[in-house]
Amino acid sequence: MKFEFLGTADTGGIPLHRCQCEICESARLKGVSNRSSSAYLELDDGSVILFDAGYDLLCDRFNKKHIRAVFLTHFHADHCFGLIRLRKSADTIICYTPNDTQGFGDLFIHKDSIDYQVLQPFEAKEIEGVKIVALPLLHSKTTHGYVIFTCKGVVAYLTDCASIPESSLAYLKAQKIDHLFLDAAYTPYFESKKHLNWESAGEYIDAIKPKNGYLIHASCKTLLPLHVKKIRLKYPYIEQGFTIEV
């Protein structure tokens, strides 16, 4: 099975509109557009499971694909963009969410083809032999990360968090995680009660001890000092299109 990132950036994406920093200019020269953090798992039959809907072109990317379900981490705009059009699908699409009664925009008012179903903390769903567990994270909105168990390995998708609750951290430590993707939206020089930075995220990855650790949800402002100062981190930031086999 293929697990691929449709985007690994923050809300503004890279290149950021009208930004002339080296990171954004380099992206423009390469013709690269890294969008908001979201990913998908392609099953053996070609159908897909989506993790977040921050990629606004989901309807185009998966126009002929059967979407088994969407696992939404939370109802911030940069994780919901794709649902605006996807809700007009000819299919009914299940969207698993944390318990957030406010949602985003009019998604709850005009649900159309989206069937929203609340997942409780640590609740598991199984789809075609893949088990997915909802993991509480601390963010400015009620948020879940997801731990994905396939026949070949374990993936943790943990985007948008200021910290990991002790119960969730204990759960992660108890698993044999092959690939862990963790929010590191900021530099250590910027204090935030919404997101981790590359140092605090690295400390969590060290504690969880996955086989492979990666950082996601960066802006150009996060990546620029790494580029200018030629800093090499223990755990790398990944870009849109990053793919693993699981």
Image: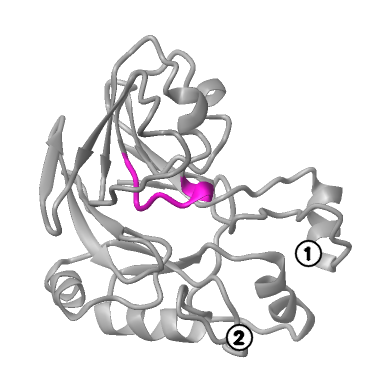
Q: Which residue range is magenta in the image?
A: 71-79
Residue at 44 percent across and 44 percent down: it is 104
Say which element carries label 1.
helix
Instruction: Locate residue 107, reporting x and y percent.
Output: 41, 33
As shown in the figure, which amino acid type bears the numbered disc 2? Answer: Phe
Marks 2/1: CA distance?
Answer: 19 Å
- The picture quadrant where one finds residue 162 is bottom left
Instruction: Locate residue 4, reporting x and y percent.
Output: 45, 43
- The picture quadrant where one finds residue 164 is bottom left
Residue at 71 percent across and 72 percent down: it is 221
Numbered mark located on residue 215 in the image:
none
Is residue 191 depicted above or below 35 in this figure? Answer: below
Numbered mark located on residue 23 in the image:
1
Seen from the viewer's position, the closer of residues 97 and 7 is 97
Is residue 197 depicted above or below 239 in this figure? Answer: below
Instruction: Locate residue 238, reporting x and y percent.
Output: 55, 60
Mark 2 or 1 closer to N-term?
A: 1
